[in-house]
Image (tube, rainbow, N blue to C red):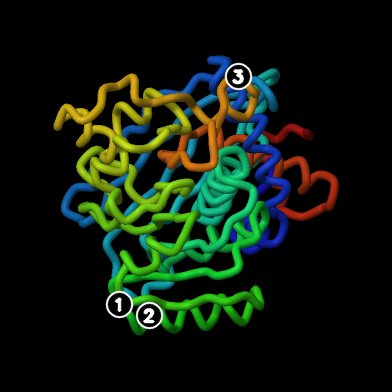
Amino acid sequence: MKIITESQVEKYLTIPECIEAMNNVMVSVSQEKSTLPIRQFMPIENTKGKMAIMPGSIPNPFCFGIKLVCKYIREKNSPYGSHVGMVLLFDSEKGIPLAMIEGASLTSIRTASVSALATKLMSKKEIKAMTILGCGEQAKRHILSMLTVREPKNIYVWGRDLKKSELFSKKMKSIYNISVSPVEYAEDAVRKSDLICTTTSSSEPILKGEWVIPGSHINLVGAAVPTSAEADEILVKKSRFITDYRPAAMAAAGELLRAIRNKDVTEEHIVAEIGEVASGKIKGRVNDNEITVYKSLGVTAQDLGAAYLLYNKSIKEGFGTIINMMDYDE
């Protein structure tokens, strides 16, 4: 069994490779060939933390496993961040453990990679400008992943703290050598953009449908519990709405659930899962004036696909620490 650390995940799990892996995994999910129980949350008694438990199995690659994620409210400068976790990967044929992989970086990379896949399949090919709402870890990942599949001329960044947005924008501009500008008001940036990524922890909408121009594509990434929503019901109603996994969306997509409760839409408003678009079964976009939304919830199949990619790479390139937990040679 391999132990693969955070620094190794960061070095070896690349966005382009991960996009391809996510394409294959999400096709199998939409073909109902995977087993994906809805994630469970366990509060940790007498703390401000909880654990998310996400088991699953996928057919290609043939593996199963579980992701364990601890979410704790910590001090701003804590070295641990808000999420600490791991992915335990098993061989389905033999029923033996293959790897234990640091989970926070893997999750962050695979999330941005699926958003990039959705953008590739759903957005217009020519993008004028991109807005990132949020300036944390997922904002950083999404700039890289979006630039992998599209070439916006300008990037705008909004966050609640303008000073933080300014520092973040300056850093991103120096890394990618592209125009990255902080904005004080989200509306100003959104009205100029045809690619938008929401990557915040907001429980209330920060993106209003009335701001979004025709032809835009939006990746809703930050909210993953039924009580939170980054976008309002107007956007949901006026969009071609696609998600990663229908059961997860009906359990936890706050934006969609609010719109359903308000009778703006029904469950049938979900046009497709992203795997159905990737397989060619359903179109991601019908015309250049359509507003498309990809709602990301995150499913264990994505973690397992990324983990198996990384495990195979570790065998070929010789990184990771081998431990023999059960005294067998594998």
**Quarter of the figure with the C terminus:** top right
Residue 54 place in picture, x, y as percent: 43, 34
Residue 88 at least partly seen = no
Q: Is residue 288 above or below residue 5?
A: above
**From the viewer's perspective, is 160 left or right of 138?**
left
Mark earlier in primary sequence (2, 3):
2
Question: How far separated are the C-alphas under marks 3 and 1?
Answer: 42 Å
Question: Residue at the spot x=70%, y=40% of the render?
Answer: 20
Residue 217 percent coordinates (x, y): 48, 47
Residue 164 image label: 2
Secondary element at tag 2: helix
Q: Which residue is mark 3?
A: 281
Callout 2: few (<14), some (14-19), or many (20+) C-alpha neighbours within 10 Å?
Answer: some
> Horizontal placement of 279 versus 193: left or right?
right
Dot 1: few (<14), some (14–19), or many (≥20) neighbours within 10 Å? few
Left or right of 218 in this view: 6: right
- Disc 3 marks which amino acid? Lys
In the image, which disc is placed on residue 161?
Answer: 1
Helix, strand or loop under label 3: loop
Amino acid residing under circle 1: Asp
The N terminus appears in which quarter of the rendering?
top right
Q: Amino acid at mark 2?
A: Lys
Whether pointer 1 and pointer 2 mark residues with C-beta atoms closer than 8 Å, the reply is yes
